[in-house]
Image (tube, rainbow, N blue to C red):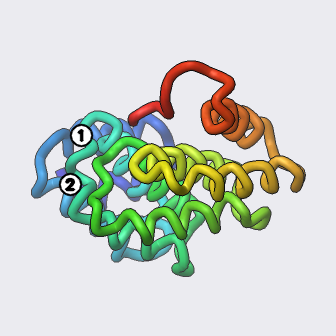
Amino acid sequence: MDIRTQLLKGNSRANADTVATYVGGDPGRFRILIQCMLDDDRRTGQLASHSVAIVCDTHPGLAVPYLGRLLDTLDAPVHEAVQRNSIRIMQTCTLPQRLHGRITSVMFALIADPQRSIAQRAFAITVAARMVQAHPGLADELRMVLEDALRTDPGPAIRSRAGKVLKVLRGTTRGRLRKS
């Protein structure tokens, strides 16, 4: 299968699943798919991003070599789906220690930015919570960012995720932040 040709057959869940199934856990095929997401035109990037996210749900380790590039998309003039799925992928894959500072800064900024989509901000809450789990000294800062986000007209996804993380940060629930 030619991945790019298949992607361009349409923006449907069925097509994204077809591509994701073909790629599976194969690093070579994944490299081709993620290059479509990161290096091709806006439309191909949009279509590829959905398939990349589906693959990473099952094989999150495939994304690790590309995390720096995925972070770069968050400030680039790319389709919103590329940005959204870049953050979505970071919810589950291993986040290398060398990128923790950058990831934390970017996620906190995304949460605080009401111009970003609700999905981007909600996914960023999960990634930021993972960073706080790795670096507990950031808990107060995340708490402030989340409380501010809740004051600036959040959608249900932000209310839900922020509320759950704030309960843990405030110590009102037993347990720890969920390790994704």
Vertical relation: 168 (above or below) 43: above
Residue at (45% x, 44% y) in the render: 133
Vertical relation: 176 (above or below) 11: above
Q: In the figure, residue 21 lies in which quadrant?
A: top left
Residue at (37% x, 75% y) in the render: 40
Q: Nearer the viewer, residue 21 or 125?
A: 125
Percent across and percent down for residue 140 are 64, 53
Q: Which mark is residue 30?
A: 2
Residue at (61% x, 62% y) in the render: 108
Q: Is residue 121 left or right of residue 67?
A: right
Vertical relation: 126 (above or below) 149: above
User: How packed is label 2: few (under 14 Cα within 10 Å), some, or many (20 or more)?
Assistant: many
Label 2 vs label 1, nearer the camera: 1
Percent across and percent down for residue 70 are 39, 66
Q: Nearer the viewer, residue 33 or 136?
A: 136
Q: Amino acid at mark 2?
A: Phe
Q: Amino acid at mark 1?
A: His
User: How packed is label 1: few (under 14 Cα within 10 Å), some, or many (20 or more)?
Assistant: some
Instruction: Please name the residue that numbered disc 1 is placed on.
Output: 59
Looking at marks 2 and 1 on the same chain, the residue that comes earlier in the sequence is marked by 2
Q: Is residue 57 left or right of residue 140?
A: left
Vertical relation: 115 (above or below) 77: above
Percent across and percent down for residue 80 are 59, 64
Q: Is residue 53 left or right of residue 65?
A: right
How far, Cα to Cα, is label 2 from label 1? 10 Å
Residue at (27% x, 59% y) in the render: 96
Proximity of marks 2 and 1: CB atoms separated by less than 8 Å: yes
Q: Of helix, strand and loop, which one carries label 1?
A: loop
Residue 10 visible in image: no
Residue 34 visible in image: yes
Marker count (numbered): 2
